[in-house]
Structures are given as structure tokens and as C-alpha cells.
Image (cartoon, helix red, strand yellow):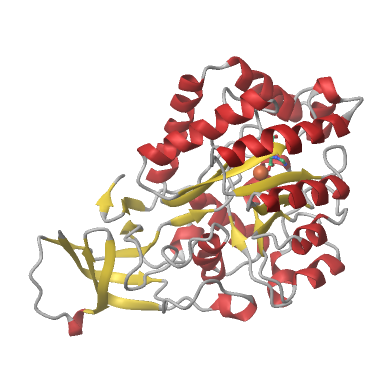
Amino acid sequence: MKQLFINIKELLQIRENNITKLSGAEMKELPTIKNAWLLIENDTIANYGEMSSLPKLEVDTTIDAKGKIILPGWCDSHTHIVYAGNREQEFADRINGLSYEEIANRGGGILNSAKTLQETSEEEVYRQSAKRLEEVIKLGTAAVEIKSGYGLTEEGELKMLRVIKKLQENYDLPIKATFLGAHAIPREYKESPDAYMDLVIEKILPKVAKENLAEYIDIFCEKGYFSVDDTHKLLSAAKKFSLKPKIHVNQFHAIGGIQAGIEHEALSVDHLEVMRPEDIESLKGTDTMPVALPSCSLFLSIPYTPARKMLDAGLPLALASDFNPGSTPSGNMNLVVSLACIKMKMTPEEAINAATINGAYAMDLSKTHGSITRGKKANFILTKEIPSYTFLPYAFGTNAIESVFINGKIVG
Ligand code: NIG
Ligand code: FE
């Protein structure tokens, strides 16, 4: 099956296939072809160029994309899409003056979602999660990472990971699974948090690995949750099962989580709302991708990741949604890209790079996804008629997407 797109107003993010991530000043460049054509063969990007160079091609369909832009689908490298129920009451409580921390200390927060998850059947968790996944695909997400972390028991964690597995089987986009058993300390372990760490490391982790339910390991390294010591312990144990770290660090306090992640060759360190100069310094020259989650900052009214400082120091940066019921009940990557520009002073080029190729890197997918490159998967967004790509972050809240293609097939 050959599909040819012609008269594309602008084809974005054209890269050679040796580019796996972009750092610092490189992120300012967004290579494009104006008035372009794009040939898709089955599930693969076969070729592209300027309309003036369009060769004579035998194709099955030709799509006229006049006035429209094509760009790689969003690569959302940090989500908690699998959960049960919602926490809109906590949202109202925060409006009325309680903080996220106070709500968590009263037994709300992650523990609230864990209780609901435990009480909900696997089929129902799947149904609710699949609905969210379909929603974000329509919004342009064409590769996604999903974490466990609302089970907090062996049964609950495995239930979540099995739901992720079922999503992997039933949907065509790449879905990467992360085991986040160390997301919060369950109430029963309040007085003996080490016993919970033992349960995660000695009982649940080996099962997750044996059933091949996750590729990555995560931990919420934060005051009141898990310490840097816990992080070292868990990441060392996970290494024996070849689970790579992608960890929650520096959301509310900088306690050394970044350095722990780097020591264990984390693929990514995520959140980074609170960054000390030494945290930026530590990331220099490493293969670890820093990931910012601006929708979380918006929803919780907490600081935004200091993207400008990080990019100006030469670091790479990826953007992700953090879609979850507590801190970010939205998986809209278009909004994430807008917020990165509006609140983090990233340029549209930097934000698009961060949400595509760098997001792909943060899921080990940048050899196959994240750019318009011959041989990569045909996962891309076709916009409506828009004046320029800057219109995407500028017109925040507007849905500028006409359709989304995954493996060459139109999905939304
Ligand atoms: O990434 N910070 C830790 N975990 C999630 C929020 C969890 C929740 O409130 O349910 C996050 O923001
Ligand atoms: Fe998160």
C-alpha cells in the first residue's frame, strides 16, 4: 500500500537516521521542507522532498495536504494513563486551600488512587484506560510510556502491568511499560517503610521481570516518599533484571535523585521542577534525558522546570504529559508544547524537538520514531489548514489536528 501526500505546506522534523537526540543549541533548529511531498509505503516513511522534485510514482492513494502541516506524532515518554476512577474532589479541596502535600498526608493522593485501583476489576481498569489512550491518540500521541504505581500491592501492581500489556496487544502505537511499585508508601507500611521496599524488591520486582511485564523501573524519589538510599537499592536490584531506570526526581525537593539516576545510567530523570546548579552540572555529558512535565506544574501551581537554564547549559530536554489522576489529569501533548513555550520560554522549535525526537529517545524509540526520516515508522500528525507551525503552540487549547497516522494507518 503506497500513500502519497502532496502540496504539504511544511513537512517538519526532517532528520538523518543517526540523530537520536538533540541538546542545547541544536534544539533551536527544526529542519523542514516547504511545499513538500511525502511517500508512505505500508507502515514506513519511504521518501519525501520538495514538490518541484516529485518523481512519477505509482501509488494507491494521493492526499492533497494543501495549507496543512505534517509533523511526527508526539512521543509522550511519561504517563500514568492506567488508573481507576478520578480525584476531582481533591481538585476542589485544593481550590479551597489544601495543598497537594496536605491532601496526601490525610491519606488522599496516590493512596486514594491505589484504593480505587485495588477495588476495581482488571477489565474495568482496562476499559477506563483504553478510553484515555484513544483520547490521546486523537490528540496526536503516537508513542507512549505508561507506568504502574497505583497498585502498591503485588496483586495491584501486576494488575496494572497486565492492563498495559493488553493495551500493547490491542493498539498499534509503541507502548513502553514501567514498573513504579515504589510510588508511595501504603498506609499499612507507614511505620515500617523498609518492609515495603523489601516487598517491592524481593517479591514484586522478580515477578514483574519473570512475566516480562516492564522494560523500565521507576521510583518517586522525594521527601515523604522514597529516599536516595531506597533509590540506589531499587535501581541496583532492577539492574539484575535488566530494567532500565526512568525516575521521578526533584518534583518538590532536590534531594540527590538526579545524581542517583545518573549513577545507575537512567534513561531519563523526570519532573525537575526544583533544580540546583549542581543538578544541571551533573547532567552534563551523560546519556540521561531530562524530562519536563509542564502540565503538572500548571495543575498543581508549582514551579516549571527551568528549561532555559538547562538548554543554555547545553543539556537536552524532552517534554511529556505525566497524564495521571492526581497531578495532571490531561494527556494533551499539544497543551504541553504550548505551556513549554508560554511558561518555560522554549521556542516553538525547541518545544517540538522536545516532544518528538527527544521524547522518542526517552523511550528508546528514536531509531524508529520521533522524526520524518526514511525508514522510520509512519507515525505522524496531519494538521488542519494553519498559517505556520508556530500557530500550534500559539493557539493554545485549539485543536489544530485533522488526523493522526500510526504505522501508515489513519487512527483519528
Ligand atoms: O508524576 N509525583 C508522583 N507521581 C505523579 C502523581 C501521582 C498522583 O498524584 O496520583 C506525578 O506527578
Ligand atoms: Fe509522573
* Residue 42 occupies quadrant: bottom left
Residue nearest the viewer, comparing 211 with 69: 211
Residue occupying the far right of the picture: 191
For the question of whether residue 79 can be seen, the reply is: yes
400 vs 390: above or below: above
The N terminus is located in which quarter? Answer: bottom left
The residue that appears at 61% across and 45% down in the rendered structure is: 322
Residue 380 lies left or right of residue 96; in this view the side is left
The C terminus is located in which quarter? Answer: top left
200 vs 74: above or below: above
Residue 102 lies left or right of residue 383; in this view the side is right
The residue that appears at 50% across and 22% down in the rendered structure is: 122
* Residue 131 occupies quadrant: top left
Total numbered badges shown on the rendered structure? 0
Image spot of residue 195 (x, y percent): 85, 30
268 vs 237: above or below: below
Residue occupying the far bottom of the picture: 53
The residue that appears at 52% across and 68% down in the rendered structure is: 353
Residue 276 lies left or right of residue 81; in this view the side is right
For the question of whether residue 80 can be seen, the reply is: no
Image spot of residue 165 (x, y percent): 47, 37
Image spot of residue 311 (x, y percent): 68, 73
Residue 151 lies left or right of residue 141; in this view the side is right
213 vs 407: above or below: above
The residue that appears at 83% across and 41% down in the rendered structure is: 226
Residue nearest the viewer, comparing 49 with 236: 236
